[in-house]
Image (tube, helix red, strand yellow):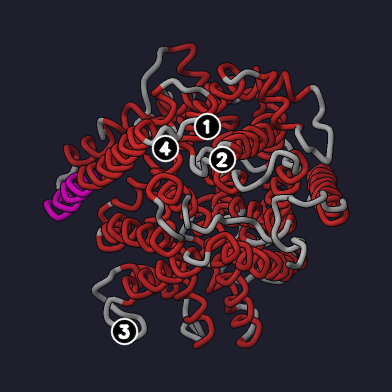
């Protein structure tokens, strides 16, 4: 008999908040508005909501049901959860994605999380007081340049990163109860902070217009975001972007939801829990996420500036400057709320990323909580330090692309096919509805079997062979040329090679060549991690056969 | 802000908020299942 203490959720509301916290991440506030702006504003919203209903919600049910089914057989991570659904050898290796993705994403995600911690500190001590917009942007550049220091602490970006990782590891070492406690504190605070900032965004109007930006208006920002453009519904690019956002916003295709749900008993509900957590995420993204960055930036800098400059970096390079326009007290408060909100969004997600590894090592190698958490922390540190030291050489972006983007789509597609077509919809439907506190509409049986896999296939193929300039209509009628952003071209690094060939400035050429060698290194790290986890799964499988531990 | 945009924004936000509140209210108010269930907070005192 094992002496390892079994983990369990404290309460149902704690489970739902932890699941919602897992889903609510930095992307709700940073990626969603940027995607909306880059895809034509109002053109994006309708496909986004349709994808939520046809892909997001079904994937949540698939992952909750798969996780609870695996948990019934004593599995708490995807390799053996998938294996319990079909005993063909390949599925446990497909399940490797459910541990690999989490460690690889946690490695760089904790770095962004550490920025939010550092920015809370800088907001409190008034670092941004009186700085111009360009100076606030330059501050971010100095911060991520690890050789310079904005606080006097040498290597502060590294120190903040290690501190953030230690905090995550320590909380994880307290098991699910620790994760649940953070979710119960973090989620309400995040919503309160979000409501305050959203209220400011909604009531800013034209009061932020200046002689430099006379047309600045928060209403223009909202107008741009919410004016429906029905003709865009026929543009595959917008649908692809909307479907892609679903992965990031709901944290599907990662293996964390299965891990959390593996601790739920068959007689307890998952149908209602899944939609409740999913809609909580949508509330944070659609209601709060759309009312902060876009209206505030458009309210001070104008819609044209926003269209040109919308990007992930705005959160750190622009928002502190905009808060400064609210006076010393309110700007400090807004800074603490904004970066505090991002921190809570980040930590509730990064904690979830640690649990599949811990569940796997406990199930297969009898690691207790502490050993599981600290081994996760160590591997994440080894994987993460290159993203900190070589951030400007593209290691961070490479991790984000392969682990945080491509791997999610591959895994989600595979698990959906397994659930709907191999495990079978009869058993799958029973699993979703077993113990349910709501009756899932029968229409979803059809959607899960046909529509969701089709949408996932569309996202995967669309990303694999993205046409030049993302112009699908032109590609269909005038011949298909791959865009450098397509997976195939990314694999061969065509874009980077073209840039190197075209560079005439020796310094620029050297920088691009350094980027090239660093991205190769990043790929080597990612591949090494995947092989390492696959080898552990193989050892665990042989161990299970030897110990006759298969049901 | 034009009227169409305002209607779409208000409708979407209200709908998402109401549905979120409804499902969460159900999570909070549906009575717990008899023991043993998945949660430790309501376990019987030993």
> Residue A33 versus residue A37: which sits nearer the camera?
A33
Q: Return the residue nearer the eye: A164 or B7.
A: A164
Residues at discs 2 and 3 both on one chain: yes
State whether the magenta stretch is mostly helix, strand or loop. Answer: helix
Asked if badge 3 and badge 1 are on a common chain, one would say yes
Q: Chain of mark 3?
A: A
Q: Which residue is the site of mark 3?
A: A153
| Residue drawn where x is 51% and y is 35% of the image | A81
Q: Which residue is mark 2?
A: A252
Q: Which mark is residue A97?
A: 4
Magenta residues, as a range? Answer: A505-519
Chain bearing mark 2: A
Disc 3/disc 4 C-alpha distance (Å):
37 Å
Look at the numbered discs 1 and 2 and tell me whether their residues touch, using CB distance below 8 Å.
yes
Q: What residue is shown with label 1?
A: A412
Local crowd size for mark 2, using a 10 Å CA cut-off: few (<14), some (14–19), many (≥20): many
Of pointers 2 and 3, the one earlier in the residue sequence? 3
**The furthest residue to the front:** A1
């Amino acid at each position: 008999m094992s002496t390892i203490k079994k983990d369990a959720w404290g309460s149902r509301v704690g489970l739902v908040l932890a699941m919602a916290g897992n889903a609510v991440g930095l992307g709700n506030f940073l990626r969603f508005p940027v995607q909306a702006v880059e895809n034509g504003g109002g053109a994006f919203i309708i496909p986004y909501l349709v994808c939520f209903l046809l892909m997001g919600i079904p994937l949540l049910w698939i992952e909750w049901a798969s996780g609870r089914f695996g948990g019934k057989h004593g599995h708490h991570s995807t390799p053996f959860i998938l294996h319990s659904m079909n005993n063909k050898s390949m599925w446990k290796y497909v399940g490797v994605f459910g541990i690999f993705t989490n460690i690889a994403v946690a490695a760089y995600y904790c770095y962004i999380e550490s920025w939010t911690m550092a920015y809370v500190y800088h907001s409190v001590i008034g670092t941004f007081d009186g700085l111009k917009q360009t100076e606030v942007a330059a501050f971010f550049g100095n911060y991520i340049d690890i050789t310079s220091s904005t606080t006097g602490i040498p290597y502060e970006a590294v120190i903040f990163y290690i501190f953030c990782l230690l905090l995550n590891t320590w909380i994880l070492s307290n098991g699910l109860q620790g994760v649940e406690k953070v979710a119960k504190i973090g989620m309400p605070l995040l919503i309160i902070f979000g409501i305050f900032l959203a209220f400011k965004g909604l009531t800013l109007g034209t009061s932020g217009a200046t002689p430099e930006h006379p047309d600045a208006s928060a209403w223009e920002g909202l107008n741009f975001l919410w004016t429906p453009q029905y003709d865009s519904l026929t543009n595959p690019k917008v649908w692809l972007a909307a479907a892609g956002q679903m992965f990031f916003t709901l944290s599907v295709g990662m293996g964390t939801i299965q891990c959390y749900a593996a601790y739920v008993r068959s007689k307890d509900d998952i149908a209602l829990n899944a939609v409740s957590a999913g809609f909580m995420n949508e509330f944070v993204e659609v209601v709060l996420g759309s009312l902060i960055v876009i209206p505030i930036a458009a309210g001070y800098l104008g819609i044209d500036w926003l269209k040109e400059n919308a990007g992930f970096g705005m959160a750190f390079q622009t928002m502190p400057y905009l808060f400064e326009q609210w006076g010393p007290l309110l700007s400090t408060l807004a800074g603490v709320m904004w970066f505090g909100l991002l921190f809570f969004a980040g930590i509730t997600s990064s904690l979830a990323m640690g649990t599949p590894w811990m569940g796997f090592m406990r199930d297969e190698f009898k690691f207790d909580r502490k050993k599981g958490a600290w081994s996760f922390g160590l591997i994440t540190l080894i994987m993460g330090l290159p993203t900190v030291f070589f951030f400007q050489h593209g290691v961070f972006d490479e991790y984000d692309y392969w682990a945080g983007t491509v791997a999610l789509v591959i895994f989600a597609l595979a698990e959906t096919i397994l659930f709907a077509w191999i495990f079978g919809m009869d058993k799958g439907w029973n699993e979703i509805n077993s113990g349910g506190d709501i009756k899932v509409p029968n229409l979803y049986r059809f959607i899960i079997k046909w529509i969701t896999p089709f949408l996932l296939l569309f996202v995967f193929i669309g990303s694999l062979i993205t046409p030049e300039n993302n112009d699908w209509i032109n590609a269909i009628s005038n011949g298909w040329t791959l865009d450098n952003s397509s997976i195939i071209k990314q694999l061969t690094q065509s874009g980077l090679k073209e840039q190197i060939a075209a560079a005439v400035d020796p310094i620029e050429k050297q920088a691009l060549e350094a980027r090239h060698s660093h991205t190769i290194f990043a790929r080597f790290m990612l591949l090494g991690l995947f092989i390492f986890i696959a080898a552990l799964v193989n050892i665990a499988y042989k161990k299970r056969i030897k110990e006759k531990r298969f049901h | 802000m034009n009227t169409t945009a305002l209607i779409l924004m208000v409708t979407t936000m209200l709908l998402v908020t109401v549905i979120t509140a409804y499902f969460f209210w159900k999570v909070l108010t549906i009575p717990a299942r008899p023991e043993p269930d998945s949660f430790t907070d309501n376990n019987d005192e030993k």
